[in-house]
């Protein structure tokens, strides 16, 4: 009701002046923000500022929520999905990327240590050289893990197993490394340093060592079946890429050019080329079947026709033959390893092996 008396009008004027002097209190409730955007022109300046602040806050919360969701999805893929992706499947048993990444770290450390202790005279082109193995590790690691599953599944059928003492001995040898250790060597300190460098825990390292110890036990078991004094030949060879090159080598030898010189200059087999083609004493089964068949058919001093294998064309010359000579330790060890490798290859031919490694998995595993 409007004021009627003079006193009432004076009080109303006084109240209006007091209200004008007080700062304007603007308040916009959260639920009224959409309406404030719609009725923006009808709001006071203070109400617009309050509404704008809430709009900015809402936008910030929405952006933060989206970013958090994206980060969560990325982390879930990095920490849950990617580690579970298989790099290979062996008879339906998958090898997860996490195992592959751990094995890469384990082998990279081991090969780097071997490379530091490798003789400077060693040929880095040799597939057994640590540098060559490091270069091929991202692919060969899948093969090694696949072979381990096959080996484990068949070891029990052979009655082969390893106990904790054998695993402890193998772990101690691994920690000590290929070089000499000083008198102050401490196993626990050295093992802790390896764990720090590889970022692997003790159980992971021990599992890889356990697999290796079991593989060695299987190789020993297979070697026990072999003849300790098999037929052997002492031979030399020149290996070239094509049959035409092999015929050229034959022509050079017929022209009485030295076998050793031709091998040094032309052979693609780096290991024997540096020895003038000399292979030393070799038992049956150490070389490819076609090579064995040709070499063991030759008499001492004879040279055969070129023989094709997966490595190329071989020109073979036999120097001596023996049917009772015992194997030297280096050749016995090499035959043991070849026997084990051939056994694994036979297992692979009957197994269902699916190669599933992708560039994305390699990139993830090498970044860990």
Image (tube, rainbow, N blue to C red):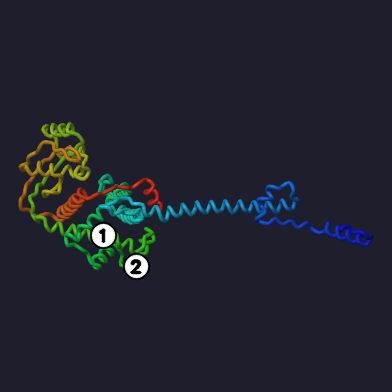
Residue that appears at 90% across and 59% down: 3
Residue 253, percent across and down?
12, 34
Residue 58 in view of the camera: yes
Residue 15, percent across and down?
86, 60
Tell me where residue 291 sits by quadrant.
Answer: top left
Q: Is residue 355 left or right of residue 76?
A: left
Q: Secondary structure at mark 1?
A: helix
Residue 116 in view of the camera: no
Residue that appears at 13% across and 55% down: 328
Q: Quadrant of the C terminus?
A: bottom left
Q: Nearer the viewer, mark 2 or mark 1?
A: 1
Circle 1 residues within 10 Å: few <14, some 14–19, many ≥20: some
Instruction: From the image, tell me which residue sits under label 1.
Output: 211
325 or 45, nearer to the observer = 45
Residue 185's disc number: none
Mark 2 or mark 1, which has the lower sequence index? 2
Instruction: From the image, tell me which residue sits under label 2.
Output: 188
Residue 330, percent across and down?
17, 54
191 or 33, nearer to the observer = 33
């Amino acid at each position: 009701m409007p004021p009627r008396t003079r006193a009432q009008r004076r009080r109303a004027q006084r109240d209006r002046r007091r209200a004008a002097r007080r700062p304007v209190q603007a308040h916009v409730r959260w639920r009224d923000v959409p309406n404030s955007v719609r009725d923006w022109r009808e709001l006071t300046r203070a109400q617009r500022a309050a509404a704008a602040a809430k709009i900015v806050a809402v936008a910030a919360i929405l952006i933060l929520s989206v970013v958090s969701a994206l980060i969560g999805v990325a982390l879930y893929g990095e920490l849950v999905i990617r580690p579970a992706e298989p790099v290979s499947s062996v008879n339906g048993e998958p090898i997860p990327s996490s195992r592959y990444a751990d094995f890469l770290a384990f082998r990279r450390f081991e090969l780097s240590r071997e490379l530091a202790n490798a003789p400077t005279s060693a040929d880095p082109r040799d597939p057994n050289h640590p540098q060559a193995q490091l270069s091929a590790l991202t692919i060969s690691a899948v093969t090694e893990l696949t072979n381990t599953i096959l080996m484990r599944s068949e070891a029990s059928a052979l009655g082969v197993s390893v106990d904790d003492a054998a695993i402890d001995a193998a772990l101690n040898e691994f920690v000590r490394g290929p070089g000499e250790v000083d008198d102050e060597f401490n196993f626990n300190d050295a093992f802790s340093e390896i764990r720090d460098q590889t970022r692997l825990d003790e159980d992971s390292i021990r599992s890889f060592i356990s697999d290796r110890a079991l593989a060695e036990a299987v190789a020993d078991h297979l070697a026990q079946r072999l003849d300790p004094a098999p037929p052997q030949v002492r031979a030399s060879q020149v290996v070239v890429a094509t049959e035409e090159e092999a015929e050229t080598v034959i022509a050079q030898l017929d022209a009485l050019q030295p076998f050793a010189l031709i091998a040094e200059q032309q052979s693609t087999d780096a290991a024997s080329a540096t020895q003038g083609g000399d292979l030393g004493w070799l038992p049956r089964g150490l070389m490819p079947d076609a090579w064995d068949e040709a070499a063991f058919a030759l008499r001492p001093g004879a040279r055969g026709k070129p023989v094709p294998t997966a490595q190329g064309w071989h020109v073979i010359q036999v120097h001596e033959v023996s049917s009772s000579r015992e194997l030297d330790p280096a050749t016995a060890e090499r035959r043991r390893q070849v026997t084990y490798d051939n056994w694994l290859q036979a297992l692979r031919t009957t197994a269902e092996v699916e190669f599933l490694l992708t560039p994305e998995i390699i990139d993830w595993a090498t970044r860990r």
